[in-house]
């Protein structure tokens, strides 16, 4: 396809991507815009197809390059010209661990916090067809199975946020041609050409692979096959979980059949999803660690992994519960007049008499101030990680432990309905 034709086709492909995911009027949409060509194209295309009042733009400043300030200023100017609200979030690297991994985690944390503050439940990202291909090649090099080789879906959910990628059907070069045709500027991050980074090396290697017949079309076909297989496996896991896993508030109870991780895919998939759900983590534990932990629990040991505790019960049943020390406290210094409750630990919704200077965290040692906790029927270890309301060091309420004081707590989304959705 000639470049001009491909560039002109960008609008049609963008519209096609929105056919099944077009947002309702007045629903707020977040746009993650770095200033690169892909995300800038996303911003301009979105502004052409939706009411600008619906669109909220976020740029994360990683503080790694002095040029970034100028690039972010350009994003802010373009967003303003389009009538879009623009926010800048700053992130700083502490020098620990892998820089790119830390930057990805920091970027997502900034996006999530911003979305929650702006009452945004859907964020659009500028991942392209090229990102899709690079992702599957990197995962192939790591020996990934079906879950890794499926790459990215157009619509996924992460930490309760919907992530839409309307540019997955667009090539990076075509997007830049479209921007050039419309006299729209963008910035190129020099790290995108730095061979120290895995994705850059993968991008450079792809040119050689195409010469050997591993073309863009072939890789996209492979991704399509893997996504179909992944969907079937997720459905099988969901049915297996319905039969062999029971939810008890924020805990999961596994029948003996669900603890046999020998060879079948469904028990393995269910167990990995369970640790991610109970532990409130995006990524599942390593398979070898998972096997060892479950094996110890089947022998009667109480073990921990990924912010979770696995404890044997009667009849060969095993309980998976949250580790209180792995939860985080949240504080709301100013209660909104129209608010009825607060979210905590990304799984719980606490509803009650909101007031300033309240802190929401795990019950922990506060259980000593809950004289009727045994009447709940929940194990003590489970209640230690249950949601509680505090003012300073004083316990105000612990709904699951029998101390309500006008407060209630409920799981926002249960395990069976959320753990087997299409996730990254």
Image (tube, rainbow, N blue to C red):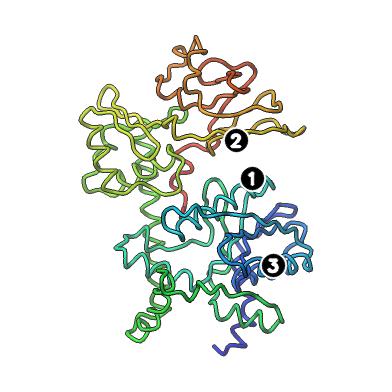
Label located before the other in sequence (2 or 1): 1
Q: CA distance from mark 2 to mark 3?
A: 32 Å
Label located before the other in sequence (2 or 3): 3
- Indicate whether 319 appears above or below 98: above
Q: Is residue 387 something one can see in this rendering?
A: yes
> What kind of element bears circle 1?
helix
- The residue sitting at the bottom extreme is 2
Q: Decide which of 327, 149 is in the foreground and name it.
A: 327
> Which residue bears the numbered disc 3?
75
Question: x, y percentage for residue 172?
Answer: 54, 77
Q: CA distance from mark 1 to mark 3?
A: 22 Å
> What kind of element bears circle 3?
helix
Question: x, y percentage for residue 65?
Answer: 58, 66
Q: Quadrant of residue 272?
A: top left
**Disc number for residue 343:** 2
Q: Tell me whether the residue at label 2 lies in contact with that at label 1, contact meaning CB atoms closer than 8 angstroms.
A: yes
- The residue sitting at the top extreme is 371
Q: Decide which of 217, 299 is in the foreground and name it.
A: 299
**Disc number for residue 116:** 1
Label located before the other in sequence (1 or 3): 3
């Amino acid at each position: 396809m000639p470049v001009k034709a491909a560039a002109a086709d960008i609008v049609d492909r963008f519209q096609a991507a929105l056919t099944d995911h077009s947002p309702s009027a007045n629903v707020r949409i977040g746009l993650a815009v770095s200033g690169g060509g892909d995300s800038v194209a996303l911003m301009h295309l979105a502004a052409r197809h939706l009411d600008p009042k619906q669109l909220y733009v976020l740029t994360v400043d990683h503080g790694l390059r002095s040029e970034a300030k100028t690039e972010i200023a350009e994003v802010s100017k373009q967003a303003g010209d389009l009538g879009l609200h623009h926010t800048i979030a700053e992130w700083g690297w502490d020098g620990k661990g892998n820089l790119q991994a830390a930057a990805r985690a920091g970027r997502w944390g900034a996006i999530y916090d911003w979305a929650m503050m702006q009452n945004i439940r859907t964020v659009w990202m500028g991942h392209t067809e090229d990102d899709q291909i690079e992702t599957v090649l990197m995962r192939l090099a790591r020996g990934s199975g079906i879950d890794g080789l499926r790459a990215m879906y157009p619509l996924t959910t992460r930490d309760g946020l919907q992530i839409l990628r309307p540019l997955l059907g667009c090539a990076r070069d075509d997007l830049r041609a479209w921007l050039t045709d419309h006299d729209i500027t963008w910035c190129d991050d020099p790290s995108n050409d730095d061979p120290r980074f895995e994705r850059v090396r993968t991008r450079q290697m792809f040119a050689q692979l195409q010469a050997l017949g591993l073309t863009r079309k072939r890789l996209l076909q492979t991704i399509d096959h893997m996504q179909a297989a992944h969907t079937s496996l997720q459905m099988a896991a969901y049915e297996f979980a319905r039969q062999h896993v029971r939810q008890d508030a924020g805990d999961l109870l596994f029948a003996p059949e669900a603890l046999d991780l020998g060879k079948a895919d469904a028990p393995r998939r269910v167990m990995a999803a369970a640790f991610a759900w109970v532990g409130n983590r995006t990524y599942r534990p390593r398979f070898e660690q998972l096997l060892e932990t479950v094996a110890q629990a089947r022998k009667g040991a109480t073990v921990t992994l990924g912010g979770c505790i696995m404890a044997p019960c009667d009849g060969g049943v095993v309980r998976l519960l949250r580790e209180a020390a792995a939860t985080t406290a949240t504080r709301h210094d100013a209660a909104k007049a129209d608010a009825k409750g607060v979210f905590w630990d990304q799984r719980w919704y606490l509803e009650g008499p909101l007031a300033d200077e309240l802190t929401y965290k795990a019950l922990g040692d506060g259980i000593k101030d809950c004289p009727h906790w045994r009447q709940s029927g929940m194990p003590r270890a489970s209640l230690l990680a249950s949601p509680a309301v505090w003012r300073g060091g004083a316990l105000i309420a612990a709904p699951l432990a029998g101390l309500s004081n006008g407060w209630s707590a409920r799981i926002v989304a249960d395990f069976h309905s959320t753990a087997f959705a299409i996730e990254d």
